[in-house]
Image (tube, rainbow, N blue to C red):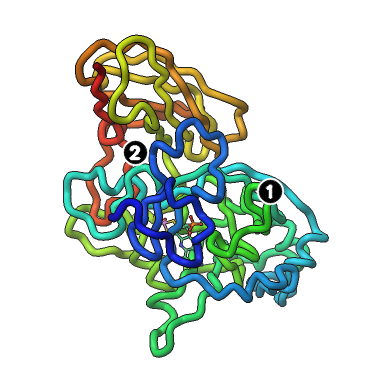
Amino acid sequence: QSDGEPLPDYVAWKDAEDMIVHSKQTLETKRAAQGSELITPSTELYIRNNLPAPPDEIVADRDAWEVEIDGVANPGKMTVGEMKTLAVETVVCVLQCSGNGRAFFDHETSGSQWSVGAAGNVVWTGVPVRAVIDAMGGANAGAVFLTGTGGEEIPEGLPPETIQVERSVPKAAMDQAILAWEMNGEPLPLAHGGPLRLVIPGYYGVNNVKYLKRLAMTAEESPNKIQQTSYRVRPVGVKGDPSQPSMYEMAVKSWITGPLMDAATGKVQVHGVAMGGVSGLDKIEVSTDGGQNWAEAQFLGPDLGPYAWRPFVLITELSEGTHMLASRATNEAGVTQPEFFPPNERGYGNNGWRAHAVDVTVS
Ligand code: MSS
């Protein structure tokens, strides 16, 4: 990880001050930048690419972008322009990498050492997946998964299954899934999947396939590595296999975004963000003594739905010394963020409140 490094060319339009550049393919939003933001500006949103992003030309004529629709009564191609005539919907949801929080595990993990910044709250506009499937005559009998394929060029000589980004999610996720052409009120930037991206609200980042070139109702999960053995939660030291849980639905989670290092004695605003996973938020609590005592904090701004995050604040008094500030969210399903999340081979899914706490020195 290198702080203050120049941004890679394809995301040179982002705000360098707010980003941590892990590599050309992985950029994280700084914790302080998340602050109490209701929506993450695209200039701050993290980037995670498994393969180099496609060339700019694919967004030259956005409406002409074609998607192959398969596993339906009348398979065929549909352009973004045609999709725009079917139906349109807006959804706000958290986009979060499966490995967000990986850096907080005690064991060694391979993969980007994300802390809290491989996540953002984004406004997506596009066509409901259901409308597209209906327009093609409906899903084939026996379809169990919704499978999306990314439009990256596969490097020559490599079998596509080993590297192509293709993910399958249970077809029930279709209820909330959309094919998005707009992000935060602007044409979807190429770096975030333009011209068209599959968005599965409530599901981890990897399922939100960028530059979508094929959408299929399938009886089986994708045979690709990214589905079969990657993004599988298993104990440390164990290899990935299809019997292990896939990184699908996100869990209830929150973290402090300020103050992060020091504060002056007296009244202070403690800020953070909280998400319910696949259900809305019920409450958010903050501790200033490492989890011995908790006080209910206040959500800030409107509730943008079950898949969105909510900023929160607690005004409290801090005495001189070092304080461990922690937050703990509870969702409407009654699930509370745990103190610890079990270590696992790839460091996925960390939502333990203790690992996400910050030590602040008050003087
Ligand atoms: N898609 C595609 N096509 N490619 C790639 O690489 N990645 C994933 C998703 N999608 C990809 C896709 C991941 S893995 C993530 S997180 C996300 O995406 C991110 O996003 P942005 O926009 O932020 O970059 Mo982990 O779970």
- Disc 1 marks a residue whose amino acid type is Gly
Image-based side of 200 in relation to 180, left or right:
left
- The residue furthest bottom is 157
* Quadrant location of the N terminus in the rendered image: bottom left
Q: Quadrant of residue 23?
A: bottom left
Neighbour class for label 1 at 10 Å: few (<14), some, many (≥20)? Answer: few
User: Residue at coordinates 35% horizontally, 26% vertically from top-left?
Assistant: 259
Circle 1 — which element?
Answer: loop
Q: Which residue is mark 2?
A: 351
Q: Front-most of 83 and 42?
A: 42
Image-based side of 184 in relation to 166, left or right:
right
Where in the figure is residue 221, as x and y percent of width and height?
Answer: 47, 67
Q: Quadrant of residue 26?
A: bottom left
Where in the figure is residue 84, as x and y percent of width and height?
Answer: 78, 60
Image-based side of 75 in relation to 305, left or right:
right
> Could you tell which of marks 2 and 1 lies nearer the N-terminus?
1
Q: Front-most of 47 and 135?
A: 47
Q: Nearer the viewer, mark 2 or mark 1?
A: 1
Q: Front-most of 361 and 323?
A: 361
Report whether residue 73 is seen: no
The residues bearing labels 2 and 1 have C-alpha atoms spaced at a distance of 30 Å
Q: Residue 185: give its label.
A: 1
User: Residue at coordinates 45% horizontally, 48% vertically from top-left?
Assistant: 96
- Disc 2 marks a residue whose amino acid type is Asn
